[in-house]
Image: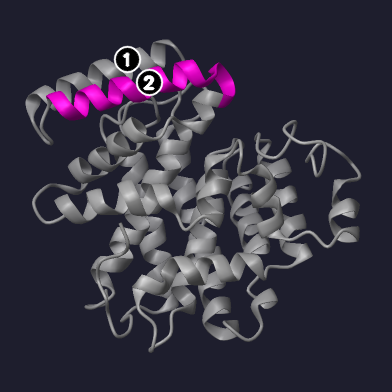
């Protein structure tokens, strides 16, 4: 589903875009009871709810910066938008306050999206958003790619490492190889798209976000609480898209099993019902007991909320 609202222009400035991105991440992490992930009543042994709140506030500066760069340099000087540098800035700011990987995936999604929103001009519509996003990534610089590698390394997270012989973040020669071969962000995402759904999402027009996440937001936003809408987005994405993080740790079979359980809950219970709440709690317990963490689903949920919030406020402003 494409973004449905065709507007003549966005009544949002770059500060607004950044604010809505931060709000999206706060809503996502606060979703209760979001199965298998940190939420307002559940922590992990090494990650706490408060860590994610801190991480949410740590990304606003670079969301605003990249939106401002895009509004200034799109479409004439695309290599000056600095998407990679702003992803790295999010991770650096977060790591100064939280010593664990809480928002690499979210930063990799929201920073390019904020750039695309910032690039929308008076004559554009939000319908052009996926095309603008792809254009920005295709014209990113080698420095952007290097900054992404540094961000993955700083976050100490899996991503491009150990999946391909080229441009492994653990290889000391990778940065020089990227520079020598003139590799940009789009190239890196293209190489990793076969095993990483975030990379695939970014170079293919946001298929998960625009097919499952955003439409769910648009369907329920006026009739249910923000928490219920967040949970519905999360559950809908998980039911339809096996989670990359679970697949990476436990294999396709387990990821498919988790998605099937999410689908059963969606089909057998209604949003905001007592039955839904009870089954979500049971599902949460099952995932935690087995250490199945749908982390990529959480990232897609935050990104879907970001699109929904920008769409909602694009006509009225904040």
Q: Position of residue 312 (x, y in %)?
A: 24, 67
Q: Which residue matches tag 2?
A: 258
Q: Nearer the viewer, residue 175 or 182?
A: 182
Q: Is residue 199 above or below residue 85?
A: above
Give the residue drawn at x 34%, y 44%: 28
- Image coordinates of residue 3 in percent, x first then y, are 31, 64
Magenta residue span:
248-268
Give the image location of residue 151, x and y in percent: 69, 49
Q: Nearer the viewer, residue 150 or 303?
A: 303
- The answer to whether marks 2 and 1 mark residues whose Cβ atoms lie closer than 8 Å is no
Residue 296 is a magenta residue:
no
Residue at 8% x, 51% y: name it: 223
Q: Which residue in the structure is indicated by mark 1? A: 285
Q: Name the foreground residue: 268 vs 85.
A: 268
Query: Dot 1: what SS?
Result: helix
Inspect this view and state whether residue 214 appears. yes
For the residue carrying disc 2, how many other residues have a C-alpha within 10 Å: few (<14), some (14-19), or many (20+)?
Answer: many
Q: Could you tell me how far apart the alpha carbons at marks 2 and 1 are, in whole angstroms?
A: 13 Å
The location of residue 121, given as percent across then percent down, is: 43, 85
């Amino acid at each position: 589903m494409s973004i449905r609202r065709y507007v003549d222009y966005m009544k949002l400035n770059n500060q607004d875009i950044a604010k809505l991105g931060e709000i999206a991440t706060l809503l996502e992490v606060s979703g209760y009871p979001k199965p298998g992930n940190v939420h307002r009543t559940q922590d992990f042994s090494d990650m706490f709810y408060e860590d994610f709140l801190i991480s949410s506030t740590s990304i606003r500066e670079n969301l605003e910066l990249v939106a401002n760069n895009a509004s200034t340099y799109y479409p004439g000087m695309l290599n000056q938008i600095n998407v990679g540098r702003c992803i790295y800035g999010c991770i650096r700011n977060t790591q100064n306050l939280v010593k664990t990987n809480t928002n690499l995936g979210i930063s990799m999604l929201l920073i390019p999206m904020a750039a695309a929103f910032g690039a929308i001009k008076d004559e554009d519509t939000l319908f052009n958003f996926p095309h603008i996003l792809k254009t920005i990534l295709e014209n990113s610089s080698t420095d952007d790619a290097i900054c992404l590698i540094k961000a993955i390394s700083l976050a100490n997270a899996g991503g491009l490492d150990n999946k391909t012989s080229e441009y492994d973040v653990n290889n000391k020669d990778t940065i020089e190889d990227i520079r020598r071969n003139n590799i940009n962000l789009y190239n890196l995402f293209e190489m990793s798209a076969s095993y990483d759904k975030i990379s695939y999402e970014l170079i293919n027009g946001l298929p998960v976000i625009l097919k499952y996440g955003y439409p769910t937001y648009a369907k329920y936003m006026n009739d249910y609480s923000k928490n219920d809408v967040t949970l519905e987005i999360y559950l809908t994405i998980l039911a339809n898209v096996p989670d990359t993080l679970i697949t990476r740790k436990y294999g396709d079979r387990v990821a498919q099993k988790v998605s099937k359980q999410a689908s059963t809950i969606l089909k057998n219970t209604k949003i905001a019902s007592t039955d839904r709440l009870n089954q979500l709690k049971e599902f949460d317990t099952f995932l935690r007991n087995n250490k199945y963490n749908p982390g990529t689903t959480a990232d897609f949920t935050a990104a879907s909320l970001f699109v929904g919030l920008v769409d909602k406020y694009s006509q009225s402003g904040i």
